[in-house]
Image: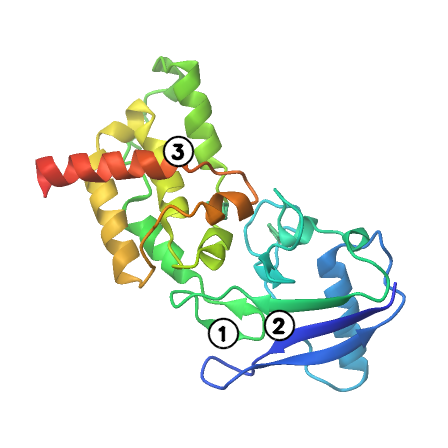
Amino acid sequence: MDLNLKVWRQKNATEKGALKDYAIKEVSPDSSFLEMLDLLNDQLIESGEDPVAFDHDCREGICGSCSLYVNGEAHGPSRAITTCQLHMRSFKDGDTIYIEPFRAKAFPVIKDLVVDRSSFDRIQQAGGFISVNTSGNTQDANALPIPKADADKAFDAATCIGCGACVATCKNASAMLFVSAKVSQFSLLPQGKVEAKSRALNMVHQMDLEGFGNCTNTGACEVECPKGISLENIARLNREFLGATITEG
Ligand code: SF4
Ligand code: FES
């Protein structure tokens, strides 16, 4: 496949960026999208140009590092996959492909296609954990009976990989789907109940401090989420937050 790429190039966080055209030839339809970018970078390095900076790690849909806007959609045109799971057979020979970084005030561009998502880390640090006895006498988690339906919902919420596609897709750049997944994975389980109130209050407070927008229930986040995190989690977070505000706020 021969393709025309329009890639966002930006030297650093302070300089203005722009889309730059690149022609790339003989791309295998079986290669992944990131392998296609590797090929482009080989070409750029050979011609003495600066390679395109982009985030990646596991390349199997687990780590949440790859964060590209491809033809105007987070993680590209397919549903329920990350950019690293996108394959070139999803495109046609001669296609023009726009490749941009995730855009949100709370995700500033560091270079080219790489954005700073440490705001997510700070939200996690504000409450996305449980405190357990690690003295060696820790209770076996399996000793606590948990209804299967709750265990399944908690597990589904825990599949959020923190990629940020929900934020990049939302017209308000809201992080509610991410935060709701991180709150839900604990709030549905007995181990998460102890700190449930402070968790909801602190994570939402940190989310607001980081400059994410408000949720207006458009649902775009759910559509573009590679892990199928449900809007049901946002409803749960709203209930948790409201309850915590009334009793602790
Ligand atoms: S909710 Fe979905 S889109 Fe948002 S960070 Fe988690 S996995 Fe990514
Ligand atoms: S590189 Fe890990 S999810 Fe894409």
The image quarter containing residue 199 is top left
Q: CA distance from mark 3 to mark 2?
A: 36 Å
Q: CA distance from mark 2 to mark 1?
A: 9 Å
Among the two numbered marks 3 and 2 on one chain, the one whose residue lies closer to the N terminus: 2
Residue 104 shown left or right of residue 189 in the figure: right
Give the residue type at disc 2: Ala
Give the residue type at disc 1: Ile
Among the two numbered marks 1 and 3 on one chain, the one whose residue lies closer to the N terminus: 1
Report the disc number at residue 53.
Answer: 2
Which sits in the foreground, 177 or 84? 177
**Secondary element at tag 3:** helix
Give the residue type at disc 3: Glu
Is ligand 2 closer than 8 angstroms to the Cβ of mark 1?
A: no
| Relative vertical location of residue 130 with respect to residue 143 in this rendering, above or below | below
| Relative vertical location of residue 45 with respect to residue 181 in this rendering, above or below | below
Q: Quadrant of the C terminus?
A: top left
At label 2, counting other C-alpha atoms closer than 10 Å, the crowd grade (few under 14, some 14-19, many 20 or more) is some
Where is residue 20? Give x, y as percent.
Answer: 67, 81
Where is residue 168? Give x, y as percent.
Answer: 48, 59
Residue 243 shown left or right of residue 16 in the figure: left
Residue 38 shown left or right of residue 215 in the figure: right
Report the disc number at residue 110.
Answer: 1
Give me the residue at 61% from left, 54% from top: 75
Q: CA distance from mark 1 to mark 3?
A: 33 Å
Which sits in the foreground, 34 or 225? 225
Q: Quadrant of the N terminus?
A: bottom right
Q: Nearer the viewer, mark 1 or mark 3?
A: 3
Residue 21 shown left or right of residue 67 in the figure: right
- Residue bearing the label numbered 3: 232
At label 1, counting other C-alpha atoms closer than 10 Å, the crowd grade (few under 14, some 14-19, many 20 or more) is some
Are the residues at dot 2 and dot 1 in contact (C-beta closer than 8 Å)?
Answer: yes
Are the residues at dot 3 and dot 2 in contact (C-beta closer than 8 Å)?
Answer: no
